[in-house]
Amino acid sequence: MIGRNSISFDRRQLLSGAATLAAGSMIGSAAGFAKAPMLGTLAPAFYRFKHGAMEATVISDGPLSFPDAGKIFLRAPDADIRKLLADEFLPTDAVRMEQNILVLNTGDKLVMFDTGLYSMKPNPTLPSGRILKSLAEAGIKPEDIDAIVLTHPHIDHAGGIMSADGKTRLFPNAQIFTTEADFNFWTDEKRIGTPAESSRNTVLKNLVPNKDRLVMVKDGQEILPGIQAVASHGHTVGHMSYMISSGGKSLCFTGDIAHHSILLRRPKMAISFDTDAEAASASRIRMCDMLSSQKIPAMIFHLPWPGIGNIVKDGEGFRFMPVPMHPA
Ligand SMILES: [Zn+2]
């Protein structure tokens, strides 16, 4: 009964609000107030915050879109996948993923984690490939970047190292951190003619010309002061996450331990881009258990902008609780 009363009360309030609005707009038009034009412009695609003594800036390479959820999410019945999406008020057909890139000023080095697709974009109509524009909006000069740290060299993480024609380094002063396992896997001729070929092409175009600038990362290694590699293999054979520590605070740039919140809800599911779905799922569960039990916030590359939040254990899986953004 209480519930019913509160619903009808809310409805009355809504209706009286609507009546006030209608009256207001009539007065407005009678007095001849100008109608504001629709602007269609968005805020610059960067978000800046302090992390201990470091300054972090999230920039965007723009969204990715996949036409059919049933084709990319695996290891669950189709109806379950659609329901998981519907339960989160998301479309049940096309799936949108962000490309959240982290640029970290450690006080000593300017470090960029992953690059997005840039020119490697498979769908020219999508507003992705905007990494250089986003960096400019954030006031970051490409030549000031000292290090590009890759979680893995898939097309949407390593596509922005070289210019579109493959001849010029976009970040002329950057060393590039990746793993030997990933480099060897993605340059292997066995990838030719498979769905993995686009990422092989990404590596041939973006990493191979930079062979003299590659740093091969090992699990547990402190690759730069305050930045430690944490193996999270499976999505690719050498996939790495990075723990960033400063002033007693930690933040984990996880890369692709989960591409979507529904993979956190059902961590045993898989995504079609996994090299080894079983190992990817085990890494997802291990990383999420570690981050949730130690209450370490994560930055997840493909989650809704800017992708920073806490992971909380919930039933068979996890929930992502976004960290509130501070717009001022
Ligand atoms: Zn990815």
Image (cartoon, rainbow, N blue to C red):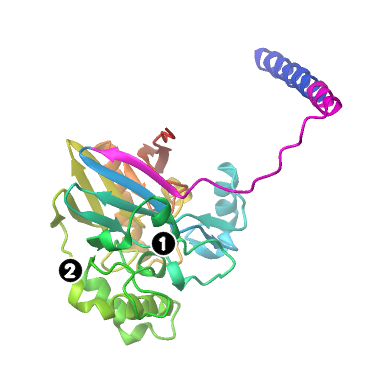
Residue lying furthest right: 30
For ligand 1, tell me if the residue under mark 2 lies within 8 Å.
no
Q: Is residue 231 above or below residue 315?
A: below
**Viewer-proximal residue among 32 and 100:** 32
Give the residue type at disc 2: Val
Is residue 38 magenta-colored? yes
The percent position of residue 203, horizontal first and vertical second, equals 33, 76
Observer able to see residue 198: yes
Region in magenta: 23-51
Q: Residues within 10 Å of mark 1 (few under 14, many from 20)?
A: some
Q: Earlier in the sequence, mark 1 or mark 2?
A: 1
Residue ID for mark 2: 215
Observer able to see residue 268: no
The percent position of residue 108, horizontal first and vertical second, equals 16, 50
**Viewer-proximal residue among 317 and 312:** 312
Q: Residue at x 71, y 42 (%)?
A: 37
Residue 82 lies left or right of residue 319; in this view the side is right
Query: Residue 132's mark?
Result: 1
